[in-house]
Image: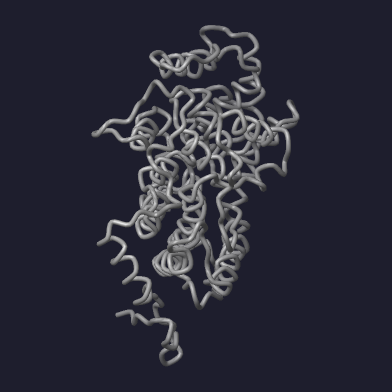
Amino acid sequence: MPHFVTDEEDDTIAGMRVTHYINLSDETAKRIEQDRLEHKENPYACKDTDIIRRDMNHDRANLHRPAFVRDAEKIMNVPYYNRYSDKTQVFSLVRNDDISRRALHVQYVSRIARNIGRLLGLNTDLIEAIALGHDIGHTPFGHAGERALSALYHERTGRYFNHNVHSVRVLDDICCLNLSLQTLDGIICHNGEMEMKEYRPSTDRREFAEFDRLKEGCYTSREAIGHLVPCTLEGCVVRISDIIAYIGKDRQDAEKLGIFEEAPVYSQKKIGVTNAEIINNMIVNIVENSYGKPYLKMDEDYFAEFSGAKKENYSHIYGNEKTEAAFKKDIEPMFCELYEELIKQAEKMDPDSVFVRHHLNYIDQITKYVHVSHKDYSENTPDDMVTDYIASMTDDYFIDLHAFLFPGSEHKVSYKGYFN
């Protein structure tokens, strides 16, 4: 049986590591409980009445579908949402129901973020909408796929592909869902690769014109996404929760898959090293430091360990030769072959081509009844449309399409099965 300790206890017993959890202080817990009894509202929370849409006359809130609930439901019901279930989180080409796919990651982010938001008295409907949509523009094969697609797109256009920006493109420019500025802002600013000791919302964005300028800047400057800051505390919560959700879970998945020849020794003592410890302890420390304040913050030592934990994951997991070998050998060249072939099809616009039948026609069906006016999708450049198409693919779809278009290609991949 594991032994559970608090901050005050030693974290070893007879030389063996013990499980390390912390709790909210009595002072903070009592303060939260008292504020709830008195129905005090967090003055820094985004109110439903603050919502901004491109078309304010459409999607008006009512009792059974409040403002940001509408955003969450719109995202969940767009066909692209289904594709989360077969997109790689970290580990590709593995048949294992216990390993995270992007759909599960999105649920983890939503749950963690709502836990933090509930304790802080924030708008949990807005938090849920941001969390559910934050990775909807992600490529197949995780961040490796994102890097490959961005390199191809940039080589031909001089523009950059980033999955957080593309998530906004999918929801706002392709599907035209009339989502709120607050939801789209939280999605574009979620960048889960950048941890910070303090998350303080920006006050710059109060209209879509400024948001659209910010989004365009991410296509033209490599550094632009590094300067994104959410305009709501709710967006800040999702951003930190994205990292909390994957650090421990990726360790758990790596261990299940046996990618380590020798189990790594992680150095965290405050936040813990397991998935459950990291989630619990980070939530508690953030709430302790952030309750009643216009920002999110963690203790200095917690931030140091949190940042260190991510670095250790990069060293032990994300840069692991086993996780990179198959991608470099076969999948990256397959990206190149697919991109070049689909560009040819997009330029010819043959109605019988895969590009027209399975991408253009698919988008026509999605946008058939949209209310918010938008330009004809086919007016986009071939590179933009091909990038949209490849980014939308699940891992299996990508592999099947490549096999269909290039039956004689030397680049083929197979999954590691349950009994290999």
Q: In which quarter of the image is residue 309?
A: bottom right
Residue 383 picture location, percent across and down: 66, 22
Indicate left or right for 115 with 364 as reference: left
What's the residue at 48%, 14% (across, down)? 373
Residue at the far bottom: name it. Answer: 14
60 or 9: nearer the viewer:
60
68 vs 200: above or below: above
What's the residue at 43%, 35% (across, down)? 51
Q: Can residue 213 be seen in this view?
A: yes
Indicate left or right for 285 with 204 as reference: left
Q: Quadrant of residue 320?
A: bottom right
Q: Which colour scheme is used?
A: one colour
Indicate left or right for 226 with 376 as reference: right
Residue 146 picture location, percent across and down: 60, 40
Count of number-bearing discs? 0
Q: Quadrant of residue 336?
A: top right
Residue 133 picture location, percent across and down: 45, 38
29 vs 213: above or below: below
Q: Can residue 419 be seen in this view?
A: no
225 or 266: nearer the viewer:
225
Residue 59 picture location, percent across and down: 36, 25
What's the residue at 73%, 38% (across, down)? 221
Q: In which quarter of the image is the N terminus?
A: bottom left
